[in-house]
Amino acid sequence: MKKKIPKIKKVIKIARIVFWFFVGAFLGLFLFISFSYLLFRKIYSHKVYPGVAINGVDFGGKKEGEVLEYFKKKNDKIAETEFIFLSDGDIATASAKEIEFGYDENLLAVQATSIGRSKNNFSNINLILQAYINRVNLPSSYRYSEQKLMNFLTPMINKIHADPVDSLFTFQNGRVTVFKPSQDGRTVDIEKLKDKIESKLLTAVTSNKPQTLAIVLPVKILKPKVATEDANNLGVKELIGEGTSLFQHSIPNRIFNVTLAATRLNGILIGPNEEFSFNKALGDVSAFTGYQQAYIIQNGRTVLGDGGGVCQVSTTLFRALLNAGLPITTRYAHAYRVGYYEQDSPPGIDATVFSPSVDLKFKNDTGNYILIQTFIDPSILKLTFSLYGTRDGRKVIMGKPIILSQTPPLPDVHQDDSTLPRDTVKQVDFPAWGANVYFTREVIKNNKVIISDKFISNYRPWQAVYLHGTKEN
């Protein structure tokens, strides 16, 4: 036993020596590698590490500015490359310089100098060794200015672009029939255009001389929301609501405008859950779109303006919406009581519009399409809005308008007018009683109230205005 103890002690001593030898060797190696790494980084400070290449070209030892300059010179050669864009006989030519087409010199310079310079030193050493032994080859990066390309191509794109046209329908003999077929629209497919340009990149940058590259603008078809073939698959089966108004004693221009506006809303389809905007559906109301001058309310005065009478149309649609039990999301009353709207109705059941802010809107919550159809009886000057769709069992309870208070018209106003001959008197505004009016509406479906409305109209008292001519003959 006594002989074995010294042997064990000897083995332990040798093991300790070996252990500390390897610890020392490891620490020495670590210090050597660390020192070498720090020295290497200092030598290549602000330079690309050896073995780092871009598209096969070694940039080891080059500064970021030198890499940048290399690709700038490449781009100077590419700058004269021409792109010819073609479409329907149209042609436009742009140089690579105009659309900033070429190598992305800034990105490439940053990428090359960034290799081996992350926050992880172990990863950096691995990349540096890998580049030194086997080379790290970065792919080329290219760029062009999408904004400049789009600005250049906008005239061509505008010529190509055409919005789709929805089919217009009418309801006759229990069926929806087409009276204006739908039309497909078209526009430039921007994503495919980008793909085509990118497919030309390699050809342009690898050539030793400027190229001429032709690109046909790709076009995609825009389908209408409502196509002709949808005519009898839209859930338009029956009358769901109707509204009427009289506009007797209107001047000829007003009659013309009422007819024109009603015609332009005839046949419009409103999709399920769609919010309908009167102003948007009608479009621009001006002399440019065919309207004539008739009296409108503007800045507290009744004056001649383009489209006078359009509010007769919005008022009639408002009445149809009320009767159909549809949710009305936006409605404005007139500033004062207009006689036309009380020819066949108590006060308060009107809706004024004035684009863009004063609008009439409703939401189609029926689950099916709604078809608007308009009709004018010229013999009695009566406008009718008929709404067709699918009845869903809703019932409408309309309260009678209640007048809370009335105010007599303001005193007549007499004004001199130098544009009228002397002794001429012209009435340009008409008296009207002021009134505060409201009415209610409940819409019931499946024995539940789904809509409860209160429509309030505060009409100001209005005065007659007479102009007295002062112009000498």
Image: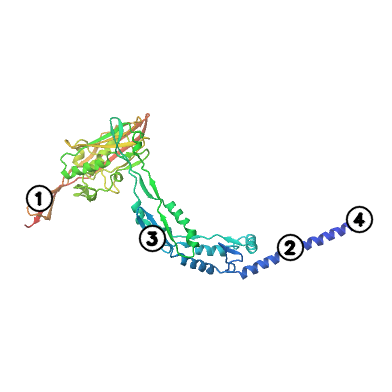
For mark 1, give the secondary structure: strand
The residue closer to the viewer here, 51 or 391, is 51
Indicate left or right for 59 with 269 as reference. Answer: right
First reached walking from the N terminus: tag 1 or tag 4: 4
First reached walking from the N terminus: tag 1 or tag 2: 2
The amino acid pointed to by label 2 is: Phe
Q: Position of residue 248 (x, y in %)?
A: 17, 39
Query: Which mark is on residue 4?
Result: 4
59, above or below 275, in the image: below
Query: Which mark is on residue 425?
Result: 1
Query: Which mark is on residue 155?
Result: none
Query: Which mark is on residue 93?
Result: 3
The amino acid pointed to by label 3 is: Thr
The amino acid pointed to by label 1 is: Val
Can residue 350 be seen here? The reply is no
291, above or below 404, in the image: below
For mark 3, give the secondary structure: strand
182, above or below 151, in the image: above
For mark 4, give the secondary structure: helix
Quadrant of the image for the C terminus?
Answer: bottom left
Instruction: Read off the residue under disc 2.
Output: 26
First reached walking from the N terminus: tag 4 or tag 3: 4
